[in-house]
Image: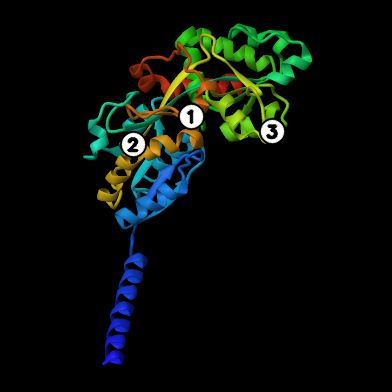
Amino acid sequence: MQYGIFSFLKTTLGAALLSAGLAAAHAADLRVLTHSSFTIPKPLLTQFEKENGVKLRITKAGDAGEMLNKLILTKANPIADVVYGVDNALAPKALAAGVIEAGSSAAAGRKPVAELPAPLVPVDYGYVTLNYHKAWFAKKGLALPQSLDDLTQPAYAKLLVVQNPATSSPGYAFLLSTIGTLGEDKAFDFWAKLRSNGLKVAKGWTEAYYTEFSQNGGKYPIVVSYATSPAAELFYSKTKLAEPPTGSLSFPGAVFRQVEGVALVKGGKNRAAAEKFVDFLRSAPVQTGMQTEMWMYPAEAGVAKSDAFKFAPEPTAFSAPTDADIAAKGAEWVARWTKVVLK
């Protein structure tokens, strides 16, 4: 009798384990397209998979500009079900290309701290601005630049590295901030002067910040980055520091408020799971955890900012052209920038 019960339990348990294994093996894929800086604590991603019976297939497609270009080029046969990282600078291009569509996620109905045009659902926001290497300027005894015009002067020759706006969202954002402040023609005059003054252009943020910026071993002590970058430098420092080794230069024309969002990919699969992923990105645990992973401010109202952000105060002013002008002229501005700066 005891053997019979043992046999029954063994058979039942084996069947249950087999069933669970088959369920895991057949978990539906959710294809997520992101830019290269997308980072969320792994336990949260694992929890999402477990709770929704899916396997996340996350593809990091370079900088946000590159990511969107890939999404547009594969429009006929979408490579993702949901996309994260399209920001307010790239939103007009995404909308015009018709590669994203609306869903019915709960997050889409909640008012965020920073807005994006539908169907994009805001996830986070930050400020693209100039960062400088404190030790480099202290060693040279050179005063910090106080304006865009200062950057074109001989004293600041060969000191600035920016990202290519054709492939980089912060690069594009910085271009837009100069146009928003100076106006189109004066902005491109400014860029021509920067070229003559030894401007360095990198493909994307990673290359500019981690290869070319002097804080990380490069030759250029000024880089287009984020207002939160100094706080991140302090947070990750291997030695105990009282203050960040870098600072921000948030003067007029050098600050763009970037809002990043998530949306369903038009023609994508697994729509139900994609909508759950949208809500997941706006959930309190993710909004909290991503702050010291991606160094952006939370878009969900009521989520507290990390203590690390006391070294990353939000700039009080920022500039950009109107959304209508970005939609109408954005591609033309990038082409003009390419001609003025690279050719």
Residue 204: tell me if it is visible: no
Q: Position of residue 220 (x, y in %)?
A: 70, 24
Q: Which residue is mark 2?
A: 282
Label 3: how many residues lie within 10 Å, few (<14), some (14-19) or many (20+)?
few
Q: Earlier in the sequence, mark 2 or mark 1?
A: 1
**Residue 239 shows which numbered tag?**
3
Q: Residue at x 47, y 29 (%)?
A: 306
Q: Position of residue 279 (x, y in %)?
A: 30, 40
Q: Nearer the viewer, mark 3 or mark 2?
A: 3
Residue 118: tell me if it is visible: yes
Residue 199 or residue 39, whichever sits in front: 39
- Please indicate whether residue 104 sits to the left or right of residue 203 in the image: left
Q: Earlier in the sequence, mark 3 or mark 2?
A: 3
Whether pointer 2 and pointer 1 mark residues with C-beta atoms closer than 8 Å, the reply is: no
Question: SS of the residue at dot 1?
Answer: helix
Q: Quadrant of the N terminus?
A: bottom left
Q: Position of residue 132 (x, y in %)?
A: 64, 19
Q: CA distance from mark 3 to mark 1?
A: 31 Å
